[in-house]
Image (cartoon, rainbow, N blue to C red):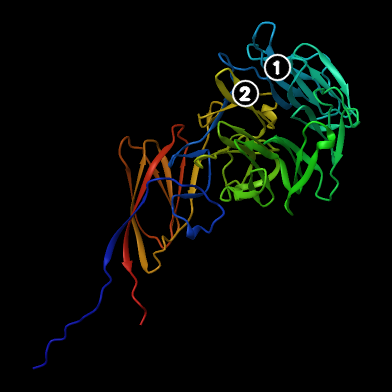
Amino acid sequence: MRKPYMREDIYPSVSRYDYPIKKFAGVDAYSKEESLALNYAKYGYNIGIINGILTKGMGINVASSLQNSFPAFQDKNRVIKKMFFYKHFDYENNCQDDRLIVYVDDEYVYQAKMTDDGFNIINGSRIQGGDACFCNYNYQGKDCLLCEGSGEGEFIIYDGSVVTRISCDSVLSQLCIHKERVFGIEKGGNKLFFSATFNPTNWNVSLTEGGYLELADGSGFIKKIISYKDSLYIFKEYSIYKLNAYGEQSEFSLSKIFESNNFIYENSIVVCNNNIIFMADDGFYLFDGYSCTKILQGIFPLIEDKNYIESCYFNHKYYLSCKIKTDDEVIGDETDTVIKNNAILSIDLANNDIEIFRGCDIKGFVPVSINSINKLFVYFNSTDRKYQIGQIDQSGKLFDTPLAKKWESVVTDFELLDKDKVLRRIYIKTACDVTLITHIDGDYSYNIVGVNGASALVVINKRAEQIGLTITSDDENFVVRGILLEFDLIRRLANE
């Protein structure tokens, strides 16, 4: 009698695999996606990643002083070309008398005190054919405003009451106070001019008065000067010089400390706490006065156009206005026919928190300190906002309009190459309504109703060799605290 045949087929076992996103890790558009965890974003806008939580990002609201909304420039047909905060102390009345300064396309300078309800022209302040630059300077016991940028080789000194016009041998494109002198860059050139000691009105070229240095070394024009760590740092298009300028001109010492084949963008150069941050064609750099180290590599690929960037340092964060890559959406003021910048990046240098604001064309930043209150004012390139003044807040709105929010993760296989993966469920901890899109063997969209104090459940049941996630929302209270992906894993058998 023949024995019964017993089949011994081997069936792969199924195991459960949970993949939690407990903390969102930031933005990395530089590294290979497969090398990153799913909590990294490769793109996003109008979001913040703060202390590992995905939340709404910064917003822009009407600028305000201590009590009231700060005025927009009254003439809506005018364009604010430059804005500056003039620190002024009224010694006669023993009080602060700070003012916001605007240079307008009618070529006049206007001011508004923090207690005023409008701007007034500064008599005698016309700067013809120029693009004004400003700096604060205490001269003869008064807090003065120095202003340059004319095409006539002169600048003005305003003491809060009277304008004095000063002649100079060259047209200067930037002013900087260092030690006892005022320094200025020759517009479109390689000469660094400086005033006489303790006298911003004296620019006579002499061994005992003012003078200039010429840096014609083939590394481009001088673009920016910064007083930093007891030295003056001179940023050219492709190099950085260090000038020790103590006392007499005979004691000046100049040395080149950095040179690159990549163009350095002058408006990205900012002193941030104890370092300088700047951006070149190949990325962001941290400069400590001696050497440069690349930073923020994951963010740099998001930037599409660097030609109109502006930056500042405020409340331990580096702010950059720039044009970032877009998707199929039109956000906020991107409806404008001509847009130079469409985004603001804010990076907290202490803990790498990041916020990305998209939908507004920012021309410049003006940090404002009023007593114990710090505010970051902005002004605009946008056609319909060219006369307005805004301030950065945490509303996630563009004035009164909530903006669309998007977080798009990297796509990864979790390095589980020997297993077939079936994505069964996704749990998402959010109290607001969001749309979740899974990128697996196709794109699948799920509308999720937020749940207070619990996680919303999304049933997927789809094969997922690789996976990426996108979260979008129009909710002005957008926040996502965590995600859990639940998989079935099946071990692959060798082909026979």
Q: Nearer the viewer, residue 206 or 155?
A: 206
Instruction: Identify which amino acid the numbered label 1 is placed on.
Output: Gln
Q: Nearer the viewer, mark 1 or mark 2?
A: 2
Can residue 220 be spotted in the picture? yes
Q: Residue at x 30, y 39 (%)?
A: 454
Element type where label 1 sits in the image? loop
Left or right: where does residue 345 sit relative to residue 428? right
Can residue 132 be spotted in the picture? no
Q: Is residue 331 above or below residue 145?
A: below
Q: Residue at x 31, y 36 (%)?
A: 453
**Residue 74, label in figure:** 1
Q: Nearer the viewer, residue 189 or 356?
A: 189
Provide residue 476's location: percent of width, then percent of height: 46, 32
**Residue 90, label in figure:** none
Left or right: where does residue 189 sit relative to residue 14? right
Determine the residue located farthest toward the bottom in the rendered image: 1
